[in-house]
Amino acid sequence: MSAADTQRLLARYGVSVLPALPAPDPDAAVRAAERLGFPVALKPTAAHLRHRADLGGVRLELGSETELRRAYAELTDYLGRPEELGLVVQRMAPRGVDTVVRAAIDPAAGAVLSFGLAGAPSELLGDTAHGLVPVTGRDAAELIRSIRTAPLLFGWRGSKPVDTAALEELLLRVSRLVDDQPEMVAVDLEPVVVAQQGLSVLGASARLAPPPPRTDLGPRHMPAY
């Protein structure tokens, strides 16, 4: 699905994605920032760069036109031409814990909802929790508490706890979306920044396809991961 269609569908389920405006050149980036309001973030959306924080391709807290133009020049000098990067400008979200919410069709189990922290915890260490769709409120609460890095959400080493109630509500809404739409074979919300109050979905993608046929008629069980 296109980004616009994905956002419209998510909005029907009460999930809003923080607006991002295209920045094909520095002047367009400045106009986008003025429309959204400073401070802003500048980031690429190209598939090979998306969610690659290790490459230094995301610039945050750009508070003025001068800072934005400087960041634009640095990124294009470092990573390539603007048309190859798919640069966008996005309003800054409140700081918090970066998480990932996904849903996908498992051939054995059906629709599966997954949750983890963004970056190395889920990608490198496999610290991701899974549950069958539809999930209940209790399921959602257990999902976010079952990952090994869950203490980061609840005030680890003196940090402020984040809004886990809002996170549980988001999991329920994504579960409802996938349960309602059998042709929705993949949903990816990344990152979801969970702050002390509320959360911000900064990126979203979705994929539609004919749902795979089910050959079993019995209850579904979670496969071993």
Image (cartoon, rainbow, N blue to C red):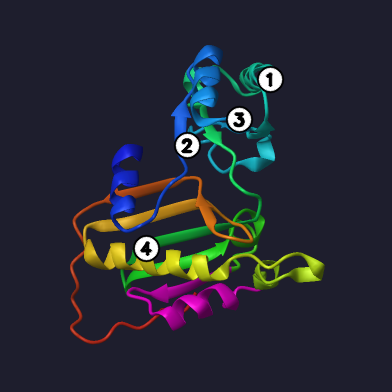
Q: Nearer the viewer, mark 4 or mark 1?
A: 4
Residue farthest to the right, as pictured = 157
Which is nearer the eye, 166 or 217? 166
Q: Quadrant of the N terminus?
A: top left
- Residue occupied by mark 3: 38
- Residue occupied by mark 1: 74
- Please tell me which of labels 3 and 1 falls first in the chain: 3
Q: Secondary structure at mark 1?
A: helix
Q: Is residue 2 among what the camera can see? A: no
Identified at 68% across, 72% down, the residue is 154
Q: Is residue 61 among what the camera can see? A: yes
Q: Could you give the CA–CA distance between mark 3 and mark 4, rounded to whole angstroms?
A: 30 Å
Q: Nearer the viewer, mark 2 or mark 3?
A: 3
Q: Which mark is residue 47?
A: 2
Bin the neighbour count of mark 2 within 10 Å (Cα to Cα): few under 14, some 14-19, many 20 and up: few
- Please tell me which of labels 2 and 3 falls first in the chain: 3
Q: Could you give the CA–CA distance between mark 4 and mark 1, rounded to whole angstroms?
A: 37 Å
